[in-house]
Image (cartoon, rainbow, N blue to C red):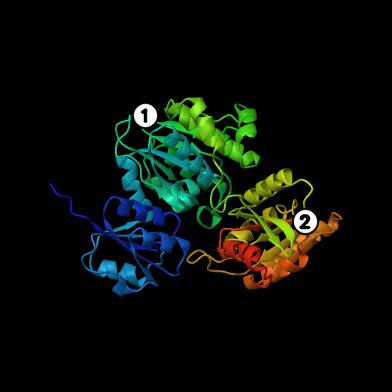
Amino acid sequence: MKVIPMKVHFIGIGGIGISALAQYYLAKGNKVSGSELKESEITQLLRKKGATIFIGHKGKNLSKNVDLVIYSSAIPKDNPELKRAKEYKLPLKTYPQALGELTKKYFTIAISGTHGKSTTTAMTSLILIKAGLDPTVIVGTKLKEFGNSNFRMGAQSSSFGPPILVIEACEYEKAFLNYFPKIIVITNIEREHLDYYKNLKNILSAFKEFISHLPENGYLVANKDDKNVVRLLGSLKKITKKYYSLRQKEDVNKLKSLLKIPGTFNIQNALAALSVARILKIPDKISFKALSGYKGAWRRFEIFSLSLNNTPFTLISDYAHHPTEIKATLQAVREKFRKRRIILVFQPHQYQRTKLLFKDFVNSFDNADYLILNEIYGVAGRDQEKNISSKDLKEAVKRKWKKRGKEKNVEFIKDIDKIPRLLSKILKRNDVVIIMGAGNIYNLVPRLKIWKKKNQPGL
């Protein structure tokens, strides 16, 4: 019997998660279309793979003969394509709902936690590939091993029966409650997404409900070195599950010697991946070999060696946007480049996050020698009030550093286009420049890399 391809339309197809799902549907032979507000590397990749991409959200982008419409949770209710889909009475699913359907068909490994999801997903996937388990992977970053994609299509069966799916399971708006995995990893838990959860208690409650989705023969890999994870585990005493708790002390020395990416947090990520591998009976020899070959992911401590006017410097691109991530990344940079000057260019992500975690942000930059703050990146649908600025953060950091007798520069530059010129003026030999944030600050990275070719600091 011939299978007729589905016509699937994605609203907000350029998102890092939903774009991976779009690639899944393409790989399965379906006809995929989608819309995004702006052109990007991701939309270009999707075009190359056969998707029809519309720039801008318009009702006419959607035809009546579409079989399924999948939309990003960030899409507002008055989106013209969403309204048109309802008008045509087309089947509608959010990205988490659509991904959730896949988790029921696969032997799913879901990587959750406040920090480290993408890296742990990548590490776990590479171990499984090395072991010949051929997983399908949906990850929140681009991997060189996947041809600079955030998706990998795997085999349609495995030694476990159903094929294996490894996914990054985000907790925002309880998205992960749509997923039904056989193995859950929790890397850590912190106060995050407070615009939705309001407090830590609600976050812990959501994680507890997620764990309840495990079947009786399921496994939970939990980081017992994280205080909030320990608190969560303490509330699970009446639930009968199989636990495979991650202990940081085991295998740490081995991982320190073989990992190419720095930072204690990356050792914890590797330990989580190693724990999953042991559940699946993968020999440690294979796991360690896979982890030793991992070179990092897009915007996760991505390192480039560049030069400007015969002045060599190191450029690091990183996605960190929570105070704990910033602090941990700067610590890792300090450990790797002990005697170098660190220039941090940081763009806060979301006004409400900046306001609610303001004190934590102020205390997160201490390992930087020179701090440049770009204006806060607003998130559509999540930032109704813009009653705070990176300028407020600048003044608070300056006051703190002055009080502690630290003679460091703190700059606020509202216009992102003016940052390269400032860098060209202050750059010294062997400086380390970090471009950090989850918004559009990463667009500076390709522009700074142009310096190497064109030697034009004003770019």
What amino acid is at disc 2?
Asp
Secondary structure beneath dot 1 equals loop
For residue 406, which quarter of the picture?
Answer: bottom right
Q: Where the C terminus falls, by quadrant? A: bottom right
Q: Is residue 9 left or right of residue 43?
A: left
Question: Which residue is more in the foreground, 227 or 20?
Answer: 20
Answer whether residue 234 is visible to the viewer in this image: no
Which dot marks residue 324? none
Question: Which residue is more in the foreground, 11 or 30?
Answer: 30
For residue 265, which quarter of the picture?
Answer: top right
Task: Quickly name the residue at label 1.
Answer: 216
Q: Position of residue 6 (x, y in %)?
A: 23, 56
Q: Which residue appears at 47% of the width and 35% of the height? A: 127
Q: Position of residue 168 (x, y in %)?
A: 45, 46
Sequence-first tag of 2 and 1 = 1
Which dot marks residue 369? 2
C-alpha span from label 2 to label 1:
51 Å
What amino acid is at disc 1?
Glu
Nearer to us: label 2 or label 1: 2
Q: Position of residue 85 (x, y in %)?
A: 28, 67
Residue count near mark 1 (Cα–Cα under 10 Å), binned few <14, some 14–19, many ≥20: few
Q: Which residue appears at 67% of the width and 68% of the height? A: 455
Residue 423 higher or lower than 283, as above or below: below
Secondary structure beneath dot 2 equals loop
Residue 206 higher or lower than 58, as above or below: above
Residue count near mark 2 (Cα–Cα under 10 Å), binned few <14, some 14–19, many ≥20: some
Q: Which residue appears at 61% of the width and 53% of the height? A: 322
Answer whether residue 381 is visible to the viewer in this image: yes
